[in-house]
Structure formats: C-alpha cells, structure tokens
Amino acid sequence: MKLFYKIFGTAMIAAAAAASCTDLDNLEQRIDSLESRIAAIEAQLDGFNANIEALGAFAEGNRTISSVAENNGVYTITLSDNTTITLDQGSTAATPVVTVDENKYWMVDYNDGNGPQYLLNSAGEKVQAGTTPLFGVDENGYWTVSYDDGETYVQVTDPSGNPVSAVSDEQTQDSFFKDVAYNEAEGTFTVILLDDRTFTLPVVPGFVCAIENVEGAQVFELNETKTYPMTVNGESEITVFKPEGWTAIVSENAGAYTLSVTAPAQATTLTKAVIADSRSDISVLAISSTGFAAMAKMQVELSEAPVPATATVTAVTDAATETSLTYTVSPDERTDSWKYIHQLATEPAPTAETQGWIDGTETTVVINELSANTEYTLYVLPYREDTPGTVASATQRTAKKVYGTKLDEYNNEGAIEIAGVVYTKEEFGEAVHVTASAPSIATSYAKEGDARIYFVDPDANATYDYTGAVMDMIIVGNSNTERSKLTMTNDDAGKANYIKLNQGTGGYLGRFVVSNIEIDATGFASYLITNNANNAFEYVMMDNCRIRMQQARPMINITVKERSIRNFTMQNCEYEITAASQNMVFSLQSSSGNCEADFENITFDNNIFYSNSTTATTNFKLVNGQYAGIGNLTVTNNTFINTITSTTFYVYIDRISTVNITRNIVWTDQTMANNCGILRAVNTWPTGNTVSENIAYRGNNTERNWQVFFGGNTNLFEGAENFNVVADNPFSGTGASFDIPSATFVPNSTYSSYGVQPVE
C-alpha cells in the first residue's frame, strides 16, 4: 500500500479531510539486573516514541513536508503545519514492533507470543493515527502507554489481561523502519515498514499552513469567540472544516492570517448532532499552487458550564544562576488574577487550599536567594473571579557554584564531576594538592582498598614519580581556565616510571582518570601506561588532555595475552605526534608477546591527532592489536592531520563486534603510499551500528584513497558508508583556521559539524 497525496479539485479536498544470605544476594542481583535492563530500555524510549510520532504523521497523510534536515542518520522533518518530527531508522533493540493496519489503526507486537494486537484506549476502542501513543516502562519492568501526551499512563495488557513485560529477552528488532528514503530531486520522503508497506509524503519547500499558539484541546464556553494567528505560505486555496454548530473563518490582512472560531450560541439551540460532536476538530485545508494539500488541525471542546482559568509556566533555563531562577507565567484570557508558590522540588506539591500563595503581578517571575545546584519548582494557581483553576508548574535547577579551583569544588561539594561521571570524597578521601613546593605525584597507597585523587596547580610543573601499582587514581588539573603540566620521569638508572595499572583483589574498582592535564612524555624512556596484572582493568579515561609522546613510543602498551582494559575513553584531547613513523595510541603486540584479550569498549571522541611538523607521520595507529578483540569501537568527531596509515589502517584488530564511526575528518597534503583508513580486522568484522558522514581530503594526491574499512567494504551491515573524499580543502574558506603549533584546526562553515567540536 502506497499513500501519496496530490489533490486536485473539490471532490478530493473533501476526501482528504476525512531468605538466606545467598537468597538475599541472588535477590539483589535480580533487582540490579532488572534496574539496569529498565534503564537500558528507558534510554531508548525517546527515539522510539519519536519514530512512532513520525509513523503517525506519515500514516495520517494529511500534511506535506516543508523542510528536511539530516544529522548522523537522524532526520528532523518540519511538516506543513510547522510541527517537527524526528525519524531515526537506527537500532531500537528491546522495543516492541509498532505499526498501523490498513485502516491506520495502531498495532503492536510485543514479541510475547501473542502476535500483533490493537492498541485500545480506556473505553476499549481501537486507536487511529492522529492520536499518538507514548510508551513508557514502569518500575516493575512492564510496558505502559499514554494517549494524552504523557499526562497519564496505563499498563499495557495482553489478550488475557496480563501486564506485558518490557524486559523480555525476546523483545528485539533491528530497526523501526525497514528503510527510509528522501528523494530531494523528486520532492518525496518515503518510509518503508518492516512488512514492506510504504508511506510517502510530498516535500514542498516553504508550503506552510499552521495554527499558532495551540496546545491541547481548546475549551469554549457557549457563544465564545477566540482568534488564533496562523502561518500560511505558498497556498492558492483554503477550505475550513468545522463541527456542526460552530463557526470558523480564516481571514487575511496584509499577508497576516488569523483563524476566528465561535462556539454554538446557547444551550437551547444544541441539537443532538452538536452534543454528539461537542469535542472535535477545526481543520484548515490549504492547497498549494502546485496542487498539493496540507491540513492544520485544532481540537475544540464545548462546555456549558463556565470554564476555569488556566495558566502555563515555562522555566527560563538560560537565565539560571547559582542563586536565582527565572520563569515565564502565561495566564489564559479567562484569568483575572494568579498566585504562586516557589519551593524545593522535593517538597509535596501545593493545592488550592495550601497556605502561603503569593500574589503574582509580572509575567516574568525571578526568584532570588536560592541554593546553588538545587532543583526548585514554581507552582502557579490562576483564578477566574474567585474560582481557582488548575495548578500549573515548572521545575528547574540553579547553576552549580563556580569555585576558584577544582580542589575548592571537591572540598566544598564533596565531589568532582569529570566527563559526566561524579567522583566523591567518600570514595577517594582527602585530595592531594600538587603545588610548586610539592610537585611530585609519588604517594603510595596506604592500604589495599585506598583510592587517590590529585589536584595539580598550573605552576606546579608536576612530575609522575610513583613506581607502585595504580588501582584507583584520578589526576586533575586544578585550574578552571588552563591545563596543568605533568612530566613523566625516569629513575636514577634511567628506567621509566610508567603508569602500572593493577586492579588488585582488595575491592578496587579499577579507575585511572586524567583530566585537564598536559602530559609531557617526550623525554620518557618508555610507553605511558600498561596493565600490570593478568585481568581486564576496568576503566581508563583521558579527558581534555594534551598528550606529547616520545618518538615512536605508544601511549598504552600491553603485550601479555591475558591483559586488557575493559573500558577506555579518550575525549576532547590533542595527541601530538613527534615521530615520522610508528606512532600508536594502543600497542597490543610486539616481538616478545601479544595481547589476545578483549577490550569491551574503546572510544575516541572529539580528539585531534596531528603531526607537529609539515611532513606527515606514517604508519600511525589508534590500536595495533592483530591478536586482540574489541566489543564496540567508537571513533566520532575526531580530526586527523597528516597522520597517514599503513595498509593495516588506524585500527588493526583480530575481531570486533560493533562500530560507531561518524563525522571524522582526515586531512593530508602528503603523498600516500597506500590506501589508508580506519579499520582492518584480521578475522571477525563488525556486524552493526553506524558508519557514516566521514570526510577525507588528500590534497593533490589522487593515486590513493581513504577507506573506512579495508578494501572499501561497505557491505558488512546496512547503512555502512565509505569516506566522502572531498576535493576542496575543508580547512580553507569562511570560518576556517589551520595552525599546527597551536593545534588549531577549524573547518569552514560547510564542514563545521565534522571533526573536533567546541567544548562548552
């Protein structure tokens, strides 16, 4: 079935309108597992529900598309009524299969053995596209659904009335849509469902018919008239459809459109048809000059009784400070006065009978003398004469207190946040302050189970002199505005004091984190980091660092087969390459041994890897591990400057499961001896995730290509794309800058979303 609306004539217009200790341990494990699985599903719900909304718009088919924007495989589509939908064909594992039947009624298959079933509202009626279901999951791991934009949720039940589990291992699907296709030349956008049914909307740039300032059902009293502004562009004909007894007129004055709606005049004139149709749609149908149709709708509801006052409250988040919050209060036209209460978000919500309401005057409400980094709620109670309406509210958080140093923050707040992870004083204890008078990081662990956190002053010129095992250690540059320098040292015999990871057996979590530090290892006699124990060290993070390695030395060297790092992340860093060849971030093999272990996650996000000379570095690698494995490799928004690979590419690995390789820039003006690229696997290639929007510039060298996968193979999984080799230099033109000494590489406006991005 292909739905495609191009309407000519009035006949078609009318058609378009239409326990023991062991038991307790097992119980805790089951609870932890349930919570983690619920959290994993919740993380996918926004994208899942957005796709449902998109499918509803395509199935309903009464709007055109005015614009399409695509970012990393996610489409942002503006419809002709100025509403925006988001469509992502990507993975939606652990979610049910949602579709519509031939009559556009919603159907869901939860993969619970019951097959597809209709979604039913509270009256037991099937729900048609036009009403968008919003899915959730409750605290017990069962699916819930809302039909009122999240105001209320009900538990989903199967045909026998039993709740449907959201954490079943069987609930998986590869993608929400089988395929999506935007044909800009033909002006169409098509979605193909998993059962091959097709829905298409025409793309008509600039064609808009939208009713503004409408949210939810508009409630009218008898004979009441309301006027709404409209945005109308590119139309040649407008037709209005209304419920019986109502009046609806679209007017135009000097290019400004309005919709005037009047409810039935008096109760005595209400016919059975009007009463039956007391909650329905006002629909404005516009026909473009090219014959396409677009419809804007507004739901109206008739009330014989006086309608209570309402108000909306909006948090002005960009105005939040450490001690003040700003809100905008918007009373409706029925509101004579309003009151407010501002309190901690953790306190019980007030009612109309609660004492302490304050009279509101200005619609911009600023609350001062608040605590930093604390969540508050503003409640507003509107009045019509002396009758209170419904309490409205908005919640927001004050800004974090800005301390003079990161050590001050740690001591006052009892925690420090690095790259989205919070490290507490309860875990790491009193910090070690590394200063110019005490510049050495050499403190050993007092006992097994201890952790260490160091704050390094910018003028300390700190040295890493610690020779013991690193079990839980954090090193943070103490300034809010500049990095601190840390020099790697050799002992008196010239032996390098490299960082020896060892998670141990005494309850250590295994974390090594470096943030806001410039690491100077140019005079270092060895690699920087290794795992010194036959296990997988849990977590290594390099955040906002500048890393300068000795010539031909890797940053991380592991050559024992049982050793690995379970999770590694490098983000927002500059990695300066000083050698002409053989530079690596990870070296997992040597003439004396090879790492054969698996690394669950290796992530390179928003980094610059660059040669510090005008000549290229050859045979550069992010990971050199011919015998090792990677669960998931992420290489996103990185900039590679004159870092040329060999035929084994940036990542040389034995086996790999999934990848996310997106929006990277590789740039070279040097001769490439071979084809170069991101990934070469010896045995097992990735089977899924995302590979798209990577660009390469190779100067005048046209003999060799940049490839994402060795051999240019893009058939490993659906959606994998090769490099886009661009002819124009992305670091030349409007907004661009290119400076090797300062590691400043800013692409021009055309490619501003590629490569490293500014960090707030």
Image (cartoon, rainbow, N blue to C red):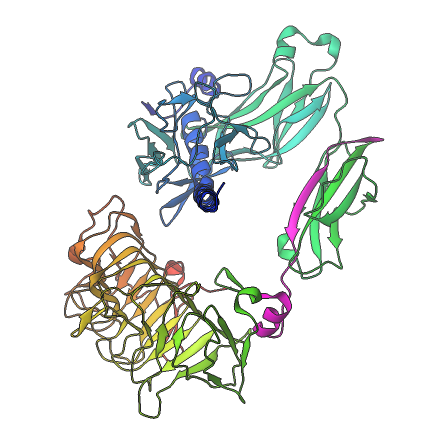
Residue at the farthest right position: 386
Q: Nearer the viewer, residue 523 or 395?
A: 523
Image position, residue 492 (x, y; %)? 35, 93
In the orientation shown, which residue stands out farthest toward the front? 20
Residue 589: image x %, image y %? 20, 69
Of the pair 154 and 401, the residue shown nearer to us:
154
- Is 389 covered by the magenta stretch? yes
Q: Residue at x 17, y 70 (%)?
A: 672
Q: Nearer the viewer, residue 418 or 83?
A: 418
Region in magenta: 386-415
Choose top left, top right, bottom left or bottom right for residue 563. bottom left
With 389 as the anchor, is 542 left or right in this view?
left
From this viewpoint, is residue 479 visible? no
Q: Is residue 496 left or right of residue 241?
A: left
Residue 281's place in the image compared with 329, above or below, is: above
Q: Position of residue 313 (x, y in %)?
A: 68, 43
In x, y percent, where is residue 237?
50, 26
- In this view, the residue farthest toward the bottom is 492
